[in-house]
Image (cartoon, grey):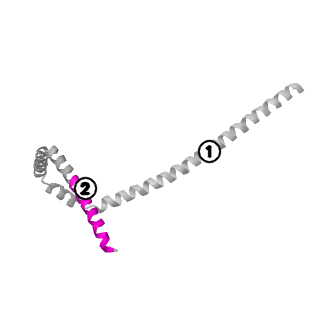
Amino acid sequence: MNEQTVAQLLEETRAGNRLLKKQLAATRLAALALAALVLVLGVLLSDALAEVRSVIAVVDGLDLERVSEAIAALDVQSLNEAIAELKSQAGSLDAEAINETMAALSEAAGSIEEAAETFNRVTAFFRR
């Protein structure tokens, strides 16, 4: 082999080594990122498992037979009838009369307040 061929092979080897070093650095970086991702997922999974355990504890603490008995004991028909009755009573309310009554009460409260102020002014003379 001549010197030129050896120099060319040496340069190609160096170029290959540089490329391999870059690939090794990229692989290490990807492995580090993957390790960080696995760590984060592990922490999140640990928190999720703790939540699942607490939900399981709550469900285990429920007396499902008692809950089902309570649901079965609900008288939905009577509840529906009561709601219908309340709805009909609410529909029969005279909103205008209620508003007029509220206005009259407001006026009466104002008159009482004026009378109380007058009383306080008159009696203030005697308190001195």
- 108 left or right of 28? left
Which percent across, then down, holds residue 8?
83, 27
Amino acid type shown at disc 1: Ala
Q: Which residues are magenta?
A: 106-127
Q: Residue at x 35, y 61 (%)?
A: 57
Which percent across, then down, holds residue 119?
26, 65
Residue of label 2: 110
Neighbour tally class for label 1: few under 14, some 14-19, many 20 plus, Cα within 10 Å: few
Q: Select label 1 or label 2 by which is in front.
A: 2
Which percent across, then down, holds residue 3?
89, 27
Location of residue 95 with respect to 67 vertically, above or below = above
Q: Give the CA separation, mark 1 to mark 2.
A: 80 Å
Location of residue 10 with respect to 51 vertically, above or below = above
Q: Earlier in the sequence, mark 1 or mark 2?
A: 1
Q: Residue at x 81, y 29 (%)?
A: 9
Q: Residue at x 51, y 53 (%)?
A: 43
Give the camera-side residue of 42 and 103: 103
Q: Residue most toward the front?
A: 125
Which percent across, then down, holds residue 122?
28, 67
Question: Could you say which disc has been placed on residue 31 in the image?
Answer: 1
Q: Residue at x 19, y 47 (%)?
A: 99
Give the camera-side residue of 39 and 24: 39
Residue 107 drawn in magenta: yes
